[in-house]
Amino acid sequence: MTRLSDVYLFSYNSLQAFGWAIALFRILTDFFSTKSVNGGYASAGELICLLQTLAFIEVIHGVLGIVPSGFLFPLMQWGGRTHFLLAIVRKIYEVQESPAVLITFVAWCCIEIIRYPFYALSCLGSCPSFLTYLRYTVFIVIYPIGVVGEMWIMYQSLPVILEKNLYADYFAAIPFSYYTFVKAVLICYPFLWLQLYLYLFKQRRSKLYPRSEKEKKRK
């Protein structure tokens, strides 16, 4: 018998999947109609901001224990992407027409239109094997593309942040420079991302090749 929490999780993940599919459709429609790589944010930026903000619900899922992933890892992922999206891309108009925005958004969309249907169908215990394979394989190519796009945008934003002294009013009472903070994030980003990337490979082995993992543990 399907639990009420499973029905709720199926509905939430299905809505997120639909939203990200709409975002990808808007980006590709704009790209093929204008033949321009500068319309990534204009075509779907606000929708992606909304979807990403709503994804904080997934942290709450972990806190409440209705998903097995816990809350710390989802919180770190949500915080990193949301900061990048709302504090940099949405705030700094000068980077919104960068080709890196389109590249990043397409990478995110490709990941999410696989991840959310996988979660939705897994709640019902009827996830097809091909979707499981895609969930734990597509990231190998897509994640590096997305990270390069994110770092490219952060690098492009640095002169604007410095010139405008962005967010200085919020931190006037403390010795904090947002410009220095973003530079520090840029330096740490590859190392933090590599940890996540290797973790996903570990997940991939356990999900796609569970027998070999059990044999390793026995040895």
Image: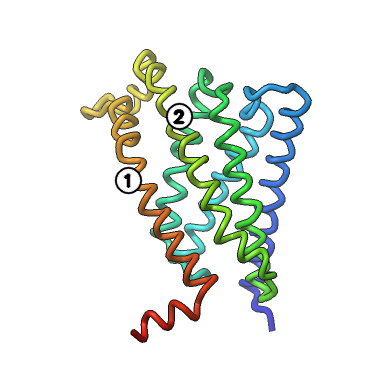
Q: Is residue 128 above or below residue 89?
A: below
* Colour logic: rainbow
Query: Is residue 65 at least partly visible in the picture?
Result: no
Which of the pair 172/39 is nearer the observer? Answer: 39
Q: Say which residue label 1 marks.
A: 191
Q: Is residue 155 above or below residue 48?
A: above
Point out the image quarter for the C terminus. bottom left
Count residues near mark 2 (Cα–Cα under 10 Å), then give few for <14, some for 14-19, many for 20+: some
Q: Say which residue label 2 marks.
A: 152
Point out the image quarter for the N terminus. bottom right
Query: Is residue 89 at least partly visible in the picture?
Result: yes
Q: Residue furthest left?
A: 175
Report, in whole angstroms, how far the alpha carbon at label 1 lies from the one at label 2.
Answer: 16 Å
- Report x, y in % for residue 21: 71, 46
Lateral position of residue 77 relative to residue 32, left or right: left
Tag 2 secondary structure: helix
Tag 1 secondary structure: helix
Residue at 33% in and 36% down:
185
Q: Residue furthest bottom?
A: 218
Q: Amino acid at mark 1?
A: Phe
Count residues near mark 1 (Cα–Cα under 10 Å), then give few for <14, some for 14-19, many for 20+: few
Residue at 68% in and 29% down:
43
Q: Amino acid at mark 2?
A: Trp
Looking at the image, tell me whether mark 1 or mark 2 is earlier in sequence order: 2
Q: Residue furthest top?
A: 163
Lateral position of residue 219 relative to residue 42, left or right: left
- Residue 167 sits in which quadrant? top left
Residue at 60% in and 57% down:
115
- Residue 196 sits in which quadrant? bottom left
Which of the pair 201/88 is nearer the observer? Answer: 201
- Report x, y in % for residue 14: 69, 58
- Residue 48 sits in which quadrant? top right
